[in-house]
Image (spheres, grey):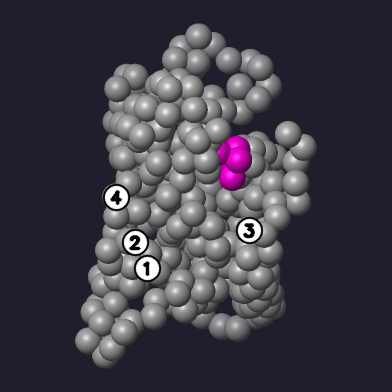
Amino acid sequence: MRPTRNDLSQMARGFLMGGADIIPGVSGGTMALVLGIYERLVTAISHFDQRLMRLVADRQWRSAAKHVDLRFLVALGTGILTGAITLAGVMLKLLLDYRMYTLAVLFGLIIASSLIVARMVRPRDRSQLLGCIGLAIVAAFFAYWLVGLEQAAGRQDSLLYYFLCGTVAICAMILPGISGSYILWLLGAYVTVAGIVRSAVHLDITSREIQILVVFAAGCGIGLICFSKLLRWLLARAHQGTMAVLGGFILGSLRLMWPFQHDLTPDVTKLKLKRYEQYLPQQWDSQITTCLLLAVAAAMAILLLEKFGRAAEPLEEQV
């Protein structure tokens, strides 16, 4: 089947999601929300169920593909994989060598993303409005606390450990505002998994690393299917409250993106082994001005991107 304009558009969205997913502290789920495909993605993933198994068993291939929105998932997945592989090295270098300005851009992106999600919450009355505000505040404080945790010490190296890491991290990855990469870092598995992925790209991978990658991917798959069902249920029965919580998660994650940080480990060269301490600038200088301009520009860019996503989606559904 020849790729259509819709397929290419979904691949572009996936590319942005893949680029976001590799940044500890930035969520591909946030990008999916901004681009207007979050609920469609959650619904498609949640349809990997018993009905799909029956359709496959009966060899009803077309019905099975339609049930899981397969064309959408393949196009989006191709873009995510391409974005993650293409941008991994670039983002790591930016966060290491140009950390302040890179974080300023990410800070602006997250602020704009939280505004976009806030617009999606449309309470029916004052009571529901107050409830949504309360849920958003609780979620924001939870995310703020979570991204302030220290990395887990004494990392294990069992296959079960990597399976559980994949299960937990993928749940965070689909949640806006909570980064799966950051959860992996908290669990002490980010360095290993990211290193294996880079080795696989260069076809320099050991049998043990293949085992870890397969088990980790299995954990991701199972966690994603199970958690997407829960999210779909929440969006169907408590849409306003769920969106308020998602927006709170995004807002609370701003703590991790504060641009002004002291490097506590200047002799360490690997980003995931470095430690930083946030600080408040004592006086206004050119760096603050540059950071502010970058944050504003990034926020405007994501708002324009969201506008494009909303405008393009109805047109694509007609293709």
Instruction: Report the span colored magenta.
Output: 70-74
Q: Earlier in the sequence, mark 1 or mark 3?
A: 1
Check the picture and name the quadrant holding the C terminus: bottom right
> How far separated are the C-alphas under marks 1 and 4?
14 Å
Q: Examine the structure image and report whether residue 128 is included in the region drawn in magenta.
A: no
Q: Name the residue under label 2.
A: 235
Q: Which of marks 4 and 2 is nearer the N terminus?
A: 4
Mark 3, mark 4: which one is toward the viewer?
3
Mark 1, mark 3: which one is toward the viewer?
3
Residues at circles 4 and 2 in contact by the CB criterion of under 8 Å: no
Of helix, strand and loop, which one carries label 4?
A: helix
Mark 3, mark 2: which one is toward the viewer?
3
What kind of residue is marked 2? Leu
Question: Farthest residue toward the bottom?
Answer: 126
Q: Name the residue under label 1.
A: 243
Using the image, tell me which numbered label, if any, was put on residue 317: 3
Of helix, strand and loop, which one carries label 1?
A: helix
At x 54%, y 25%, the residue is 196
What kind of residue is marked 3? Glu
What kind of residue is marked 4? Leu
Residue 253 image offset from top left, x and y in percent? 42, 63
What kind of residue is marked 1? Met
User: Which residue is nearer to you in this view: 280 or 52?
Assistant: 52
Of helix, strand and loop, which one carries label 3?
A: helix
